[in-house]
Image (cartoon, helix red, strand yellow):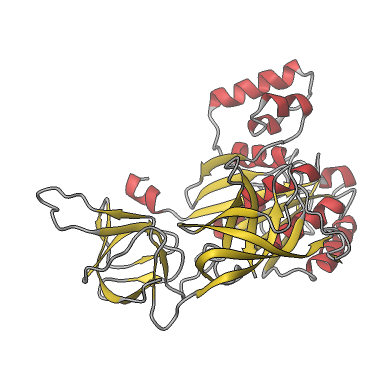
Amino acid sequence: MSQEGYLDMELLRFSTAGSVDDGKSTLIGRLLYDSKSIFQDQMEAIEEASKRKGEENVNLALLTDGLRSEREQGITIDVAYRYFATPKRKFIIADTPGHIQYTRNMVTGSSTANLAIILVDARNGVVEQTKRHSFIASLLQIPHIVYCINKMDLVDYKEETYNKVRAELEAFSSKLDTKDVRFIPLSALAGDNVVDRSSKMDWYGGPTLMYLLETIHIGSDHNHVDRRFPIQHVIRPQTKEHHDYRGYAGRIAGGVFKPGDDVMVLPSGFSSKIKSIDTLDGQLEEAFAPMSVTMTLEDDIDISRGDMLVRETNAPEATQDIDIMLCWMNKKSLVPNGKYAVKHTSKDVRCIVKEIQYKVDVNTLHRVEDNKQINMNDIARVKLRTTAPLFIDKYNRNRMTGSLILIDEATNETVGAGMII
């Protein structure tokens, strides 16, 4: 394949989640192995390691359990990112941990995903972690959820076992806000229905996991309606050939932009037209989310980092009072009325936590209103007041302009991730 064709291939980001020992790492190892996406020397190293451990089969999970402490404990601790490609698509996998104490890692790994694979052990059905991961996937508005009902080899590939687990999953996922939910029976260990179709489950007529990943439609996952371009950097080369050049660089968060389009600059409210859309490879006739580009305008307007280009008739809400679902990520509890730094798109402000409305019990989806102490991995509805207006959309409309992070100013640690409601 030419390099040009390779670069133009569509990229699918997906995350994997599931309870401990549901086979996430084995599934990813199987995807990489069966799609010929690993090198011979990697394979030989894994075969050698498996032999040393006295395992009869090659342990494909060793492909992703990258940290030594993970390999020793046999669990995934941090988010492991893996990159691979097939002739149809490029993929980035975020392999996220199964334990409750790593909920924050799942939020981090899944925040940009188009698709979430949630593994369910066919012998155990829906467990607490299945509910937790499904809830977080719906909270993060991941457009597609694929429940992989794994370890079918341990229940003799029985259709009735699959149907029973699928019915449980359908009952629970119907309460969630997810647009596209799919189910696949498979065995990651034996390779059934992962890349190759299984001869042992001829009762299943759906696609294999690999076919689904290569063909699922993700073009409409980004918001291409509302024009949003947060400015990250103002480019002024001040060289002889570009003496008067002034470009605004950033990543498009929504909508489609073309030279000649009318745009309004927030917060000033000044209007102009797009003169050009520049990239390293030359000028573009149109650009859309999530492309990174540099735009020039026909008028000389004072614009700086944190400003946003939008359509005049379709502007985001500018407000200092923000209502969010917050996933708390720090060992220190959230301080009521505490002050934190906020990062929203390319804008940095500070805020005070005005009100903690309720926590969510992730397993029952019920609100907890009597205990408002927010500890690590808790998810809660919180009201913030910021020092300057932010240009926001609801998270379910735009995942980029609808999300923010909270930072502890004393330690500079990211302490919370918020979805704007």
Residue farthest toward the bottom in the current orientation of the protein = 313
Going 75% across and 57% down the picture, which residue do you hit?
379
Q: Is residue 372 visible?
A: yes
Q: Quadrant of the N terminus?
A: top left
Query: In the visual, does 332 lie left or right of 312?
Result: right
Residue 84 horizontal/vertical position (percent): 52, 42
When the figure is inspected, residue 152 is found, relative to residue 220, above or below; the finding is: above
Q: From the viewer's perspective, tell me whether residue 260 is left or right of residue 396.
A: left
Residue 50 % position (x, y): 72, 22
Position of residue 332 measured from the top left corner of the image (x, y, whole percent): 73, 44
Q: How many marks?
A: 0
As displayed, is residue 273 above or below residue 93? below
The residue under the point 41% across, 84% down is 313
Q: Measuring 71% from the left and 36% from the top, which residue is drawn there? A: 77
Position of 371 compared to 221: left or right? right
Query: Image quarter for residue 23?
Result: top right
**As drawn, which residue projects farthest toward the top?**
52
The answer to whether residue 2 is seen in the rendering is no
Toward the left, the furthest residue is: 240
Which residue is more in the foreground, 138 or 215? 138
Q: Quadrant of the C terminus?
A: bottom right
Q: Depth check: 336 or 131 in front?
A: 336
Report the front residue among 282 and 268.
268
The spot of residue 334 in percent (x, y) is 73, 52
